[in-house]
Amino acid sequence: MNKKHSILSLLLTLVASFSFAQTQQTLPTGPTTLQQALRYAVANNEDVKKALQDEQSAEYRIRETKGSGLPQLSANGRLTVNPALAVQLLPGELAGEPAGTFIPVQFGTKYVAQGGLELQQLIFRKSFFVGLEAANTTRDLYALRTRMSEEEVLYNVSSSYLQLLQTKEQFNNIEANFNRLEQLEKILNLQYQNDVATKVELNRVTVNKINLENQRKTLAATYEQQLNGLKFFMGLPIDQPLEISDSTGLLGSAIPPVEDAKAILAQRVDYKQLLTQRRLYELNVKNIRSGYYPSLSGFGQFNYNAQRNEFTFFDGNQPWFNSVALGVQLNIPIFDGFQRRNQIRQAQVEVNKVEYDISKLTRNTQMTLDNSIRQMETSLSSIQAQERNVQLAQEVYNNTNALYKEGLSPLTDVLETEVSLREAQTNLNNERLKYQIAQLDYIRARGEIKNLIQ
């Protein structure tokens, strides 16, 4: 028996592990591309998962609203004990007594038991149909909010990824410059030992090398912090290793034309979300107005009751009595002290506020489109200039270094050209990052950021 249990437990464990592996999103081995990071983030980010839970909640809300229009059945039971029965006075004439006299009479019994069923069915209530429409609209709203959460995650992951690439490239440049200074330090050290170079020259190179070493350590720490930020947005455990690829596929030379925000708003998720939110507020106004309409419902009651002076309800020889009631109930609102009118006005204010949000989004979209295009134009021009500048700075450094080795150029020229080369490389990296962030802003403003995962 124990052996059978062990085999069964093993099988259950294997099945559970297989099921978990099927549902758990993992990253492929090797460097992670931007597209892979984005797909992982959409599947694992907590904000997206919460938005999906809201979608599920909206489905339950629709079922709840539909359930209010179905028959409502309830059971009831009641046991009453009357230690002292109420006394009623009846005219004496009923018992042959003189006129004007009264006879005290007690009605009822010491114990009364009652049980029954009650059925109610809504026939007409305008707010029910409005509520059903609002519930379906809420489902659409939460679906749009899920897409908004996904787009927010996609933007944050893309931005973090681009910053990591820039830091990584900067680190590689400093590493290359550090290696050059390290070789120069070795040469100067030999020259100093042979009384060809001075101690001051050797110290100057050492100081520059130490400064670069500190920058390298700072960049390494910055890279780890940015990498942790990327893991956070992806929903990846911080202690899990992650290596990014060296390219994103975003950088291009085509500058898009300036567009009218109104022409592209229809494909923006946040614009659709505002329209849906406005529709919900309008339905709220409609729901409050429906309170002016009458409502009609049907009901049915079936009851059993028994009365005893002794607690003998379980004695089958003594009778129980039943009663049945069927009917309809009509409610007609007449006057509510103007409460509903003021509720409608409050709800209409919310509709007006969404209109302002739509106007604000339109202007913000136009501003983002214009600014991102201008930034791409500026950065692309700067990138071309900085690429030429880096090339020239590299040539100047190579020539100066060669002249220094031949004794035709002082050490100060070598160090100055090394700094100029480093600054040119840094400026080029910064402009590339600005261009890619502007390109990312443009894609987001057009509502096309989900295209990055395709």
Image (tube, rainbow, N blue to C red):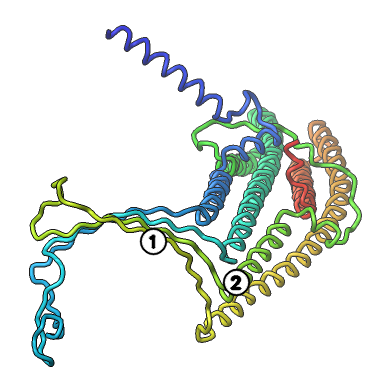
Residue 1 lies, with reference to residue 305, above or below; the image says above
Q: Which circle marks residue 290 in the picture?
A: 2
Front residue of 426/245: it is 245
Q: Nearer the viewer, mark 1 or mark 2?
A: 1
Hey, what amino acid is under mark 2? Answer: Ser
Q: Residues within 10 Å of mark 1 (few under 14, many from 20)?
A: few
Q: CA distance from mark 1 to mark 2?
A: 30 Å
Residue at far bottom of view: 100
Q: Residue at x 66, y 52 (%)?
A: 144
Q: Earlier in the sequence, mark 1 or mark 2?
A: 2
Q: Residues within 10 Å of mark 2 (few under 14, many from 20)?
A: some
Q: Position of residue 187 (x, y in %)?
A: 69, 29
Q: Residue at x 86, y 39 (%)?
A: 391
Identify the secondary structure beneath mark 2: helix
Identify the secondary structure beneath mark 1: strand
Q: Are marks 1 and 2 in contact (CB under 8 Å)?
A: no
Q: Is residue 427 visible?
A: no
| Quadrant where the N terminus is found in the figure | top left
User: Which corner quadrant of the image does residue 167 belong to?
Assistant: top right
Q: Circle 1 is placed at which residue position?
A: 325
In the rendered structure, the answer to whether residue 114 lies left or right of residue 202 reads left
Front residue of 226/285: it is 285
